[in-house]
Image (spheres, coloured by chain):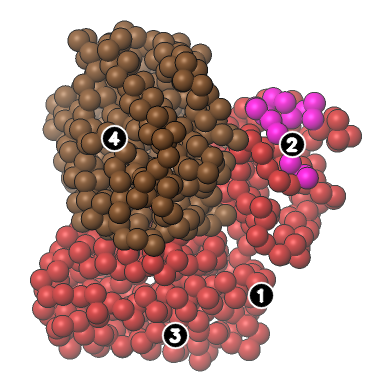
Chain colours: A red, B brown
Amino acid sequence: MNNLPLQETGSRLKRVQHAIIERQADACIITSSVNQYWLCGFIFDGFIFLFPEGEPILFVKRPSHIRDERAKQIRKPEQIPDMLREEGKPLPARILIEADQLSFSATTRLQAALGMPEVNNISAELRRIRAVKSEYELEQIRESARIHTKVYQLIPSLYCKGMTDLELQIEIERQMRLHGSVGIFRSFGENMDIFMGSMLAGDNAQAASPYDYALGGEGITPLLPIGANGTPLLPGSTLMVDMAGNYRPWMDDMTRTFAIEHAPDIAYKAHQVSIDIHNAIIRDFRAGALCSELYLLAEEIVNQNGLSPYFMGTQQQAKFIGHGVGLEINEPPVLTPRSQEALEPDMAFALEPKFVLPGIGAVGIENTYIVHESGFEKITLCEEEIVVLS
Amino acid sequence: MNNLPLQETGSRLKRVQHAIIERQADACIITSSVNQYWLCGFIFDGFIFLFPEGEPILFVKRPSHIRDERAKQIRKPEQIPDMLREEGKPLPARILIEADQLSFSATTRLQAALGMPEVNNISAELRRIRAVKSEYELEQIRESARIHTKVYQLIPSLYCKGMTDLELQIEIERQMRLHGSVGIFRSFGENMDIFMGSMLAGDNAQAASPYDYALGGEGITPLLPIGANGTPLLPGSTLMVDMAGNYRPWMDDMTRTFAIEHAPDIAYKAHQVSIDIHNAIIRDFRAGALCSELYLLAEEIVNQNGLSPYFMGTQQQAKFIGHGVGLEINEPPVLTPRSQEALEPDMAFALEPKFVLPGIGAVGIENTYIVHESGFEKITLCEEEIVVLS
């Protein structure tokens, strides 16, 4: 069932085992789909038990037949202690769990089933480990970016005069799916729903959302207040397209801006400032740079251009200009002014300095970069200027 | 921001307050998007504090400006005690939380912020409360079912010879979106991902999935092993379409079966048994019936027809034949052989007796019914026979 190279899963296992030893824990229990896939190459309803050394044990509720010799079928977590004993493993006294993802009731049930071990949280550390990619993972992100570019290049041919943001989005969604998008768009954290990405036309770009994405938008239902809301694509306004790059399990992230027939000079000017920020960051930084340094440079350029009231929103302004990407769209590091994190070789991150111009719409670009000792490799190689739809 | 009638949210609030009093709690804290929407008509990043009486307080992190006089802006949960004090509210000593949804780390942080109150789980009870719908909610489910039917009626015109399951699904997805589908498909529980619904062609219907849906399917990525997998739609096989009925916040659920050009007699026979089960259940039951009785009647009809090896899967067989529907696709009650639940007036449930025939595919239908004292109201009024695609 595993479609990942064994070398990949083997080295990931070792990195988690290193964390188990450092944290002086007896076991780490993995329950989230993303981390199950990352460690095993498939997902299941159940628990991966990792130990400081040796092979993990997979306690599987569903599916009912799994072709992996490390798998043991269970109906409920209360069966685990006996099965551990049969394997000659003592009950763990101190466990690490994905406490940011596992529910309170699932955690307390698991804890009771295992005889009340001490529970500690490994969510953030797993995210830090996953932030540094293997060459296999980076190549997936590059492949996703290549397909992402192909789909964005179709956008002018999908546009028809009189369309709404939503009507155009639906045609883009169809092309995304025909090009292999898996549809589902994975993000980390509670209340981070999104469907296939975000399209922001005109003043809908100003609508504040409850989510931690860079920009908002009203959406078409109060149950999912993000993105397109049926705004007609009016001449003189801009359309920001930030649809998912989910063509591989490891994703890229890319935003491009379109003008409906034409756009005011201020839109072109602010858009150029976004491109300038990208270029300045590529010029000045490489592996070892602090995320805060990137943010502060961007902020300085924004201030020099008098655009701070429009930077990353208007009424509600996001406090970051970029983020790691991978199996989830919001991985570490996050490019914030107070971040203590540095960019390490083989991280992949999206940089998205954006402006929201009242009465016009959002402008700017987002690219995904891979961090090398020698500099940042841009992988979202798609026209960066504002493209006119007409 | 609330687009729900005030009477709706008022009566829901009273039902939850009744549960708070019964559980002798001081407060109930709502954090999930679905229950926030159900109680307030909008969602936000933050906490709804409900008390045994009076208005709730909404502690809102994001969005930054919310137009609701009950809302108080916060940056972090640690600010809540002081703000409660300003409102003349004592710190709760015993709280109810959505422990099936809220993460372990968010729960422990909230608990610490509030001075370590006793924490109890209200997830299941909220689901039971939501299972009995208002007329407003039932009318939304009926509207969703009407649009769902319109989309399914387009399927023969979307089919082209030589298509794969996925290619046809993409055209159906587009029509769903053009007809107002919100895209996102809400389900309850961990690891219950799905994208827009399920299409099962031929032997892909036998593939076991890790999820608790009625049937499986391999999917197109190991990160989302459910549904269509690119199987060519071959003459003589069947295609089961179980795409989402998410045209309103309150959803319906409906499955229909198609034959590619033709299908063997056994497919028609088993399909008719599914229809017979629906008709027998409508004939014999009404409000007050036990969920287990419905299951056992279905099982009896299946056994009489010698179809039990194919009922609800082959290698992996689901142990339920239906479920409540509403804001989430898997609401209570669940129609299982050992359920203690009874069907109450104004519940809405989907009934889905299905068969998987090796070498052919899945057959059967799923309808959504509303429970009345006088009987079950069928709301998914769409051709029930196998429809030939050619």
Residue placed furthest toward the right = A88
Q: Which of the 4 image quarters holds residue A215?
A: bottom left
Q: Amino acid at mark 3?
A: Leu
In this orientation, which residue lies closer to the viewer: A171 or A324?
A171
Residues under numbered marks 4 and 1 in contact, where contact means CB atoms less than 8 Å apart: no
Badges 4 and 3, same chain: no
Q: CA distance from mark 3 to mark 2?
A: 46 Å
Position in image of residue B293 (x %, y %):
41, 11
User: Residue tagged by mark 1?
Assistant: A135
Count residues near mark 1 (Cα–Cα under 10 Å), then give few for <14, some for 14-19, many for 20+.
few
SS for tag 2?
strand
Name the chain letter of the residue that bears numbered label 1: A
Position in image of residue B30 (x %, y %):
37, 33
Position in image of residue A128 (x %, y %):
63, 61
User: Residue tagged by mark 3?
Assistant: A381
In this orientation, which residue lies closer to the viewer: B99 or A256?
A256
Q: Amino acid at mark 2?
A: Lys
The disc placed on residue A72 is 2
Count residues near mark 4 (Cα–Cα under 10 Å), then give few for <14, some for 14-19, many for 20+.
some
Per the image, is A81 magenta? yes
SS for tag 1?
helix
User: Residue tagged by mark 4?
Assistant: B385
Q: Which of the 4 image quarters holds residue A73?
A: top right
